[in-house]
Image (cartoon, helix red, strand yellow):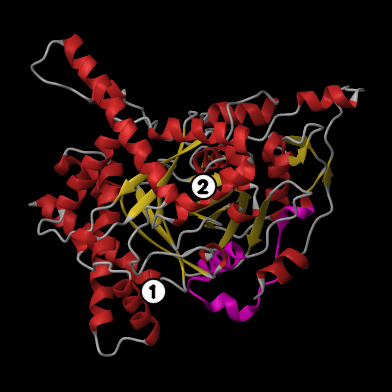
Amino acid sequence: MDVAGDVLGKPRLWKIAVKKENKGCTDGEEEINEFEPVTPAGRVFSQPALYCYIITIFKLKTQIDVETIKSGLESSLLKHKRFSSVMEKDKNGKLIWVPAEVNICDHVLVPCIDPEENESSDFYENYSARLASAPPLDSSRPQWQFHLLNVKSQDAASGIVMRVHHSLGDGVSLMSLLLACTRQHADPNLLPTIPRQTRSSRIAGAKFRGLPLPLGILLGMLLVVWYTVVDILYFAATIIWLKDSLTPIKGYPGVESGPKKIVHQSISLEDIKLVKDAIKGTVNDVMLGITSAGITRYLERRYKEERSENADADTKKKAEQRKKNGESVLPSKLRVRSTILVNTRPAPGLHELAEMMESGNKARWGNNLGYVILSLPTEKRKNPLDYAHAAAAIFRRKKLSLEAPFTYASGTLLLHLAGVKAATILTYNMIANTTFSFSNMVGPLQEVEFFGHPIMDIIPTVSGHPHALTMHFQTYMGKVTLVVSAATDVIADPKQLCLDCIDAFHSMKQAAAV
């Protein structure tokens, strides 16, 4: 099925328009002054080179009642300004959010599905992968869509695929907004319960035992300054010239427009907590440890295949290219790094967002995003828990750095001084010179329903950035789902990479139980 033709062109739609109220402004210039400016990150994501979309699959227990979903979105999501506005330039040439008339039929789509596709066990993943490579949405309309799919699969009665432009918000904020539209399945009057993540003080993290408190604080502050300077220089080097090793998972400029494949596997959150307690770390430490161990296993297998006499022509060509570049395939010599987007503005809570959509009150919102670069250890380790220990050390070190706030502030300054095109080029170079994207999103503790439709799985990913590999961890209802999105012309077997990560975790679990 051609997503661009069948879904974006000829869907079955409902012609119901939601008109914006006139707030009494008679002077056009005064009204423009009240419009909210597009954030620096939103301006960068609006450029063709980094036209990023957040794509999320919601697998449901029941068939979809289209009218219920439609009316639910009209009474909630459309009240959020981002979902009822478009980006336009004001008289000074700056991008602002301008209220627009929203026609629900432009955003809630029910595509006609080929019956043969229904037989696929990974229908929703394949559909979302095609959507990730589909043409950009019409910029004259608010940049979001919900694809309602009444297709029964092995693990769902139906599903919803959401496609939202990254300029509307970061992943955590958008997920929080969507969850504010849900209610607990056991009690539809209650909002979901999501564990609150506290941010520890950087100075408190740099403890110097045995020293007087004032001296310990002073040394902690100096350590933060030192790590921040090192990270800033490393970040600048990555933008200019420092590239990751040409491994079998490293993409190339332009990889963002190629075909994708999305796969996922789930594991128990309690099992992850077992490993977390064994290393005296955090859930994030374990997730990064799983990623490190899984990628190490995958690379080891791919390098063995390259040395095999049965290696295909493409595999041999990449091996020759690495040899020509003088790159080592020794795990300890590889440079494999991940980028992480960090919102420097705390995300609003579900109650705050729900109240905003019900009453029209304002809530904190915006892409105040900074980047953090993580170096992933790829050495093979005898003790599986050592991967998680190494990940914990990386995160402890990063918590003592102001890298994310600095990259946000410097990016904003660059936009003002050099313009959005220069900022986009530098951001693109930084991402393209690293290997993959990594993120973790916390979901509800209990089962939730989306306008009366119980959700079984939440599977998020992102498209449009120059990485061949994107790895997300999503917690929901006592389980953790690892989502691997890969460019198939670089990583032809992302399912194997996902399984390598899961197998690595089971080894960690066994080691923790000893």
- Image coords of residue 294 (percent x, y): 27, 61
Residue at image position (67%, 53%) is 145
Foreground pick, 404 / 498: 404
**Can you name the residue that lies furthest to the right here?**
26
At mark 2, the secondary structure is: helix
Magenta range: 105-133
Q: Is residue 172 left or right of residue 392?
A: right
- What crowding class fits label 1: few (fewer than 14 Cα within 10 Å), some (14-19), or many (20 or more)? some
Residue 159, label in figure = none
Q: Nearer the viewer, residue 18 or 239?
A: 239
Closest to the camera, between mark 1 and mark 2, is: 2
Magenta span contains residue 102: no
Residue 145 can be seen in this image: yes
Residue 246 figure quarter: bottom left
Please state the horizontal and vertical placement of residue 101, each as a whole percent of the image. Answer: 83, 42
From this view, report whether residue 212 is shown above or below residue 269: above
The residue tagged 2 is: 427
Which residue is nearer to you in this view: 83 or 509?
83
Mark 1–mark 2 contact, CB under 8 Å? Answer: no
* Residue 439 shows in the view: no
Tell me how far mark 1 sits from mark 2, CA to CA. Answer: 28 Å
Structural crowding at the residue carrying mark 2, measured as other residues with C-alpha within 10 Å and reported as few (<14), some (14–19) or many (≥20): some
> Amino acid under label 1?
Asp
Q: Mark 1: which secondary structure?
A: loop
Look at the image and say whether residue 123 sits in the magenta stretch.
yes
The kind of residue on which mark 2 rests is Thr
Residue marked by disc 1: 493
Above or below, 320 against 93 in this view is: below
